[in-house]
Image: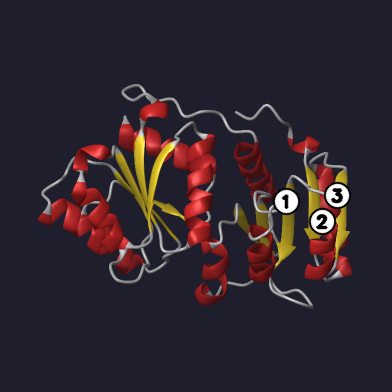
Amino acid sequence: MSTLDISELSILLVEPSSTQLKVIIKHLQQEGITSIEGVTSGSAALQSLMTYAPDLVMSSLYLPDMTATELVITMKQSDTAQNIPFMLISSETDFKALDPIRQAGVIAILPKPFNHADLTRALKATLEFIDPEQLSLAHYDVEALRVLVVDDSLMARKHITRVLNNMGITQITTANDGKQGVDTFSANQDAFDLIVTDYNMPVMDGQELIQFIRQDMQNILIPILMVTSEENELRLNNVQQSGVSAICDKPFEPQTVKEMLFRVMD
């Protein structure tokens, strides 16, 4: 449990609609949050971030000068803003529109209009990301846990790595796609205690990676956690049949990942 309180958060809110801006601010104030700066464009947000580092950036997807995805990517390229959690608020439901920002490592995606309970849950996830509690496992020393992270998105790899680091897991090796992941794991199976992989990747996807490890390499013991934005139920069912230990949605809440790791490792 985080030692911070929701009311202590400082938030930069990016919303082009003045009406929506007021509505969201009201919801945040109901949570006791008083440090809220509202801007109406991506450029104004980036200007603000140059002088002020909030605990959280909340933004609509479509801004007058850029998309939230472009805003996130620009933040990730900045030395001062790359580690600031980002929350999307959007009515968009199209997978192709949302997948890039999921891959970028947003902390949560709230529907618009959103349920206040969903906002509270997302804010708690932000607290867990900012001020995490170390993972506790009965059969493993967390600091000695060796993890292979496989994802073709550099931003996603960095985000997953940071979440794991926040839990006390520091021995992390990364791979850019399933093929590189298989090659890395094949070189020394005993070098890893856990694999965290994406699903949609070039060369070899997550399902093929799992099938290779479970069938070709006959390794049925190592836990494999899939973190994915995939929404197709048939594909996810096929992944389940391949031998994955657990599947977690992108964006994921740190507490959810912690609970899944506790389950698959213990």
Of marks 1 and 3, which one's residue comes earlier in the chain?
3
Q: Which residue type carries mark 2? A: Met
Q: Which residue is mark 1?
A: 80
Q: Reply above or below: 4 against 246.
A: above
Q: Residues within 10 Å of mark 3 (few under 14, many from 20)?
A: some
Q: Secondary structure at mark 1?
A: loop
Residue at 54% x, 46% y is 253
Of marks 2 and 1, which one's residue comes earlier in the chain?
2
Q: Which residue type carries mark 3? A: Ile
The quarter in which the N terminus is drawn is top right
Which dot marks residue 36? 3
Q: Residue 216 placed where, x, y %?
A: 11, 56
Asked if residue 7 shows in the view, the reply is yes
Residue at 31% x, 23% y is 139
Q: Secondary structure at mark 2?
A: helix
Q: Toward the viewer: 213 or 177?
A: 177
Which dot marks residue 50? 2
**Could you tell me how far apart the alpha carbons at marks 1 and 3 are, in whole angstroms?**
19 Å
Asked if residue 237 shows in the view, the reply is no
Q: Residue 215 placed where, x, y %?
A: 12, 55
**Could you tell me how far apart the alpha carbons at marks 2 and 1 are, in whole angstroms?**
8 Å
Locate residue 137: give its quadrant.
top left
Q: Reply above or below: 14 against 190.
A: below
Q: Residue 115 placed where, x, y %?
A: 68, 54
Mark in the foreground, 1 or 3: 1
Relative horizontal placement of residue 70, taking residue 253 as reference (left or right): right
Q: Mark 1 and mark 2 in contact (Cβ < 8 Å)?
A: yes
Residue at 69% x, 53% y is 79
